[in-house]
């Protein structure tokens, strides 16, 4: 039997969030009601209509420009100027990718070799570490401290730097903790990146999900950072376009060229009509049904409050208030079980789905991640189940 595989991916496991979605689908198919607080909203109709128009046009069945169709890159250019304060050249600095995920992998493949080190946050989004391993580079986790609201401290990055460090991967608003990096914090991190001549990959998937007046700042707008920052954004979250697979990478021309070279051999282009839909999303006023972004964010803040206040009311649970994204990351270590066991127990007894904190890194242990991407009544019902189950423990 053949059993020689790539060593690079020996430690790789399937994405826990995708596995958990599969498990929930199976439970539901068997008639079991499960609360997952996630992804219940539909893509707005004007976005679907734009995609359908493009699909039915003469270009609808052709390979698209590997950089992204011109309409899409023009819409991204307008969006970056309007929302992020970034002026970019759509011909040389914007690349469409099949979701932010593929954008981050293509970026890392363009920047690092095996043996290089890439700094990432712990806890951090569960795909960063596997993505780094896919490139053959070594992930180097930097701790986030709960006592500090899980905000990344530039001093901790400095301690992790070695002569092999090439890239810092950032995510703000943060998955799984909801932390949002301020301009001052980004400036401090930028200082370290400039001093050690590092690239920064900034994942801005949740850039619009902000609460209590917090603002999103793109690292590329920090002085001295434009030439060393790769910004990754996506249509998935804001417009409920998860399965459409449209994201975009903004990078200096020399890096964009390399990302495009890699993507031209991996996936040729992003589905053309999905890009047309994303262009309509970026140019449009509505993000969820007929709701505008500020209206949707008001709802998310209410959803967040219902989840976090409901969790905090459970004896033994503490929870940092997330400033952004749509995740709560409560501490559940007081229950004396591993986060894996705790998540299994919740699914079994309360029919509530949360991801064990350990899948987000060593320092995620003792926590569980809940999503609040669902209408308020669903969150309230799920929280009531949680409270009942945990009070009985
Ligand atoms: C932090 C973070 N970045 C990027 C992504 C990727 O989103 P997509 O590939 O759908 O654009 C996700 C979603 O899973 C995420 O949570």
Image: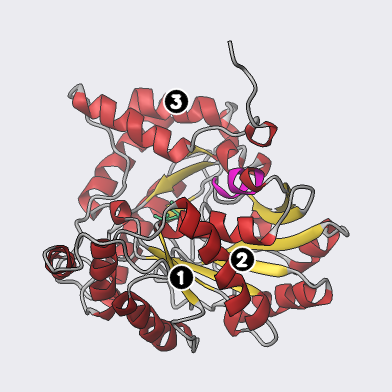
Q: What residue appears at the point 67 percent right and 55 percent down from the top-left corner?
A: 120
Q: Tell me: is circle 3 under 8 Å from ligand 1.
A: no
Q: Main secondary structure of the magenta part?
A: helix
Q: Position of residue 248 (x, y in %)?
A: 44, 68
Q: Is residue 184 visible?
A: no
Q: Position of residue 350 (x, y in %)?
A: 33, 29
Q: Which mark is residue 201?
A: 2
Q: Is residue 41 left or right of residue 242?
A: left
> In the image, ligand 1 is in what quadrant?
bottom left
Question: Which color scheme is applied?
Answer: secondary structure
Q: Contact (CB < 8 A) between labels 1 and 3?
A: no
Ligand 1 has an atom within 8 Å of the beta carbon of the residue at disc 1: no
Badge 2 element? strand
Calculate the distance from the C-alpha at mark 1 to the C-alpha at mark 3: 40 Å
Would you name the residue on which mark 3 appears?
344
Q: Which mark is residue 95?
A: 1
> What is the C-alpha distance between the residues marked 1 and 2?
15 Å
State if disc 2 and disc 1 touch (CB < 8 Å): no
Q: Which residues are magenta?
A: 127-133
The answer to whether 147 appears left or right of 262 in the picture is right
């Amino acid at each position: 039997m053949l059993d020689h595989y790539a060593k690079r991916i020996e430690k790789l496991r399937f994405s826990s969030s995708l596995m958990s979605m599969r498990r929930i689908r199976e439970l539901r198919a068997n008639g079991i009601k499960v609360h997952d607080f996630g992804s219940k909203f539909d893509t707005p109709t004007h976005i679907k209509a734009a995609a359908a128009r493009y699909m039915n046009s003469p270009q609808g069945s052709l390979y698209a420009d590997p950089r992204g169709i011109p309409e899409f890159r023009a819409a991204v250019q307008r969006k970056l100027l309007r929302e992020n304060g970034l002026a970019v050249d759509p011909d040389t600095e914007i690349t469409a990718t099949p979701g932010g995920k593929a954008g981050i992998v293509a970026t890392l493949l363009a920047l690092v070799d095996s043996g290089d080190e890439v700094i990432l946050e712990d806890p951090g989004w569960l795909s960063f570490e596997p993505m780094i391993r896919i490139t053959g580079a070594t992930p180097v986790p930097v701790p986030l401290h709960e006592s500090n609201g899980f905000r990344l401290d530039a001093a901790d990055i400095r301690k992790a730097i070695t002569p092999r460090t090439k890239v810092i991967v950032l995510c703000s608003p943060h998955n799984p903790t909801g932390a949002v990096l301020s301009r001052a914090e980004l400036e401090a991190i930028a200082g370290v990146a400039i001093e050690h001549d590092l690239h920064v990959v900034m994942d801005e998937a949740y850039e619009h999900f902000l609460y209590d007046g917090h603002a999103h700042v793109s690292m590329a707008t920090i002085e001295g950072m434009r030439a060393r920052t790769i910004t990754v954004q996506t249509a998935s979250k804001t417009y409920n376009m998860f399965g459409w697979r449209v994201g975009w990478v903004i990078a200096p021309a020399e890096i964009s060229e390399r990302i495009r070279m890699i993507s031209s051999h991996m996936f040729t282009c992003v589905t053309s009509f999905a890009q047309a839909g994303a262009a309509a999303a970026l140019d449009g006023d509505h993000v969820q049904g007929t709701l505008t972004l500020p209206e949707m964010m008001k709802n998310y803040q209410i959803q967040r409050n219902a989840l976090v206040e409901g969790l905090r009311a459970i004896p033994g649970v503490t929870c940092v208030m997330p400033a952004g994204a749509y995740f709560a990351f409560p501490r559940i270590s007081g229950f004396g079980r591993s986060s894996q066991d705790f998540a299994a127990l919740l699914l079994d007894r309360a029919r509530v789905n949360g991801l064990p904190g350990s899948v987000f890194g060593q320092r995620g242990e003792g926590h569980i991640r809940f999503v609040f991407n669902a209408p308020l009544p669903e969150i309230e019902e799920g929280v009531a189940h949680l409270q009942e189950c945990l009070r009985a423990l």
